[in-house]
Image (spheres, rainbow, N blue to C red):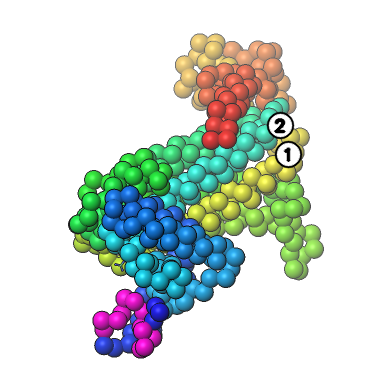
Amino acid sequence: MSWNSKGQSRLRRRFHKQVDRAAQDYVASLRFDRRLYRYDIEGSIAHAKMLAKQGLISEDEASLIVSGLVAIKEEIERGEFNFRAECEDIHMSIEERLFEKIGDAAGKLHTARSRNDQIAVDMRLFVKEAVGDTIERIRKLQRAIVGLAENNKTAIMPGYTHLQQAQPVMFAHHLLAYFEMLERDVMRFSDCLKRVDVLPLGSGALAGVAYPVDREFLARELGFSQISHNSIDAVSDRDFVIEYEAAAAITMMHLSRLAEEIVLWSSQEFGFIEIDEAYVTGSSIMPQKRNPDVVELARGKTGRVYGSLVAILTVMKGLPLAYNRDMQEDKEGLFDTVDTLISTLEVLCGLLSTMKINAVRMRESMSGYILATDLADYLTKKKLPFREAYEIVAELIKYAADRGKDLHALSLAEYRRFSRLFDEDVYAITLDTSVNARNVVGGTAVEQVSAALARARKILEAHHGK
Ligand code: ARG
């Protein structure tokens, strides 16, 4: 009954011509927006209940509609639903099927509603759930990071600036930097949720609806904490998609930096870590290879997430109010971003939970020169102005390097050639004293790192199951 004698869909009956095939395929979104079926049905069920409550349709009609929609949901989930290309989008597919199932009562569902507020509500429901899933995954990765840090509490590694050895740091301290980044990511997603959590339904095509609808009821039914306050904005706003994608882009940037470090650390030259076999791939030609493809792809996939963000920003920038079909382009990028981010978080979590640390190698990779700042600090503590101390140590290092010597290999006499302030206790400066000297909140001293680990644990416990 949904197709008339000319085989035209419900939306085309008033036209004389058949739609051009290529044009039909071009505007159709069913291929990807079928993913919204659950939210679309949820929104429609709430809408039908509201219409009945307001006396806009009868209770019988509402229950017919609701049971029809529930049955359709089951059909889709059993893989028995026929997604017909002519249906254009998920909304029309479900509506057409509802007509087939319950007859004319189906025609009452779209009372006081437009596809414009319908898609807006579907998308918001989708993003709300995606934010929840994303935060949960980030929390898991944070747990893996804290676990790895706790299991390697004593490891000291070279800290870098410009990828040049700078100062020694606790490996756990370095890892916890990522915990902090991810903590900010969680905050960004949680904050974005406040603006996603707004019900647009009741905005109609753009001007509101000419029926006494109960929007507060709809908000309660669908779990929205607020309702929108301008119908034009409500149907033309996709900020919430952009905000999710922006938060995702920043998170991917963080994950990409972590991935890059894992690539480096697992190289023969560094050898700081060994990625578990479950997360490496071989080469088709070089039998010795253990390639870190997983982390390389985490780094690589960051590009598509940035791409989707730029794409949706660009789609939106020139649009007059209110709804424009351009906005259909919000979906594939968003879906791809959610999938990419969640799968990246998942594989990195597994990889970090299984990788092995080579603490000996980390230590051995550091030359004594990494303690240059500590030598300068040593002189400064003996009341020399820091800039002078810096000069002296610079000379000293040049002297040692010219002779191919490490700092510990220099005699006291050699030290004293550069400053009379050097004494026997200069040999007491080690990687461990260097690390522990930085006993400031946020610093790398063992005491501080233990406190930071406890703090991280506390944050994770506070959010457990949330
Ligand atoms: N498929 C459309 C989208 O994703 C749904 C809304 C269509 N509304 C319309 N008036 N054509 O944006």
Residue 440 located left or right of residue 46: right
Residue under pointer 2: 152
Is residue 117 in view from this perspective? no
Where does ligand 1 appear, by image quarter? bottom left
Q: Residue at x 68, y 29 (%)?
A: 150
Q: Secondary structure at mark 2?
A: loop
Q: Residue at x 55, y 11 (%)?
A: 382
**Residue 110 versus residue 281: which sits nearer the camera?**
110
Q: Is residue 136 above or below residue 98?
A: above
Residue 20 located left or right of residue 333: left
Q: Is residue 278 above or below residue 147?
A: below
Segment colored magenta: 4-15
Residue under pointer 1: 357
Work out whether mark 1 precedes mark 2 in sequence or the reverse, and give the earlier one.
2
8 inside magenta stretch = yes
x, y (%) of residue 442? 52, 24
Question: What amino acid does circle 1 point to?
Answer: Ile
- Occupied quadrant, residue 12: bottom left
x, y (%) of residue 295? 62, 52
Question: What amino acid does circle 2 point to?
Answer: Asn
Give neighbour class at mark 1: few <14, some 14-19, many 20+ (Cα, 10 Å).
Answer: many
Residue lying furthest right = 287
Which image quadrant: the N terminus?
bottom left
Circle 1/circle 2 CB separation < 8 Å: yes
**Residue 84 versus residue 442: which sits nearer the camera?**
84
Q: Secondary structure at mark 1?
A: strand
x, y (%) of residue 216? 31, 43
x, y (%) of residue 161? 53, 38
Give neighbour class at mark 2: few <14, some 14-19, many 20+ (Cα, 10 Å).
Answer: some
